[in-house]
Every structure is written in C-alpha cells, then in structure tokens.
Amino acid sequence: MTLLISLLRQIRAGYAQRPTAFPQAIILCGVRDVRDYRIHTQHQEIITGGSAFNIKAESLRLDNLTESEVRNLWLQHTGETGQTFDDNIFVQLWEDTHGQPWLVNALAYELTWHNKHLRNRNVPITLEDYWQAKENLIQSRATHLDQLTDKLKEARVHSVISALLSGKVTGDTIPTDDVQYVVDLGLIESRPQLRISNRIYQEVIPRELTWTRQITIAHEQSWYLTPQRHIDMPKTLERFPAIFSGKCRCLDRTL
C-alpha cells in the first residue's frame, strides 16, 4: 500500500510538469480496471471516497474477438501453411472460448505445435484432434489458467462464482460492484444473462473449486464399477449422498 500511495503522489506531482519534465500520458495495463484498487487502513478496511485512481482519464478494455475474427485468425494458419481444419471445429472453438484472446491463441498453439503429428502440415486437423488439444490445455494448468485459479481465491470473486454455480444469484446475494468486477476480469458475462464466460471456464472453474476434494477422495474404484469396468449406476446413486457427506468409506466391493 505504501508503494501505491508513493506512485499516486508521483503522478500527481508530475502532472503540472507535462510534457517537458513528465510523460504526457501514462498507461497502466493489467488484468483489472485500476478503479478497483482501493486504499485500505491498517485493519484492512477500505477508505471511502472512491477509487485510488480517480485521476484516470479513461479505462480501455481489450474486448474478446468476434466469432468471425476467431475463424479468420485460425484460417491464417491455413493460408500460410496449407494445413486445413475440419469446419466443425469452429463451432466448438467459439463455444469453448467466446473469443477470449488468450484461449483462442493457446488452443491454436496446442493444436498446431504441441501435437507433433500435426506439425506435418499435409495432415488435416480433425475435430478429434481439437478435443484432445482442449483437454491437454486444461490439464496443463497453463499460466493463464493458474491466474484464473488464483482469482477464485479472492472473496469478491468467490462469492459471485459460488452464487452463480449454486443458482442463488439475486440482487440481495451479491453486490453489483462485485459482479462488475468479475465481469471486468473476464470470468463471467452479464449479457444476455449472467453466466460463466465460456465453456472452458465453465469446466475449469468447478474443477478448481473442488480440486482439494478431488485429490483427497479415497474411495476405491472396485465398489462402483461392474466386472466390465462400467459404472454401476444404481449402486453409485444409492451411495452418492453418503460419499459427499463423508460418512461412507465404500472400500468394500460388496457394498
């Protein structure tokens, strides 16, 4: 916080000296709007009076790509290398990313470079190749997805996402400022309805929120699989409430 106050003082002090002894304009670039930065007391209480950056002139946000822009971007690869994409990929690509720039580019890189087989540009890229690239990206926990996970730890973000996943989103449950904050982070969309931004986030966010639960499940597969290695649905549904209440070990094949 001391560093933030020092920065603000320097900007204010230099403003009158523009442009000869101080920059004419300064761009502060990050994953969130500077209006969301607040000055806190020693007891972590927010000092009222609006944003610490009330000196800003304008907030600019890098919007998501449109569906046609996503398609045209990927087809540049075809134009330069001759390698073709199954046309069905583009419908799935849009649903998975909704034009989020990092996801669009990361999926393209995963598909065309990390897949050694597809480095042969004479090999057409199939929908199955795309599904595998998507899963590889999610499993990789790449930097962008790690940052997303870190954001989920923030109380403001966690409250909005939790309410959204549980279907308890109302004006009384989450403050409007918190919703806008999470929208600005790109995690959710408010139009045409409040929802998680894209299909990859819809998969990643619940995974991350339940990660500890996933890695601490101690149940052996033997009790819920048939001899043919298929899920025994009647037995699974019968024991499901007990599993998640922590009252069932389910280690015995005969359960």
Image: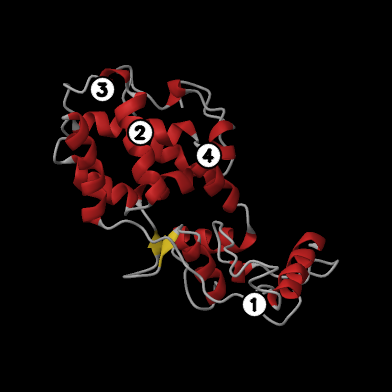
Using the image, tell me which numbered label, if any, was put on residue 118: 3
* Frontmost residue, 59 versus 103: 59
Viewer-nearest of discs 1 and 4? 1
Label whose residue precedes the other's in the sequence (4 or 3): 3
Q: Is residue 46 left or right of residue 148?
A: right
Q: Position of residue 107 (x, y in %)?
A: 34, 38
Q: CA distance from mark 1 to mark 3?
A: 50 Å
Quadrant showing the N terminus: bottom right
Asked if 212 appears above or below 33 in the picture, the reply is above
Q: Position of residue 34 (x, y in %)?
A: 60, 67
Amino acid identity at mark 4: Thr
Q: Position of residue 190 (x, y in %)?
A: 39, 69
Asked if 143 appears above or below 51 in the picture, the reply is above
Q: Residue furthest front?
A: 20
Query: Residue beneath label 4, please?
Result: 143
Q: Is residue 184 left or right of residue 39?
A: left
- Element type at marker 2? helix
- Element type at marker 4? helix
Q: CA distance from mark 4 to mark 3?
A: 24 Å
Q: CA distance from mark 2 to mark 3?
A: 11 Å
Using the image, tell me which numbered label, if any, was put on residue 55: 1
| Disc 4 crowd, CA 10 A, few/some/many (<14, 14-19, 20+) | few
Asked whether disc 2 touches disc 1, contact meaning CB atoms under 8 Å apart, the reply is: no
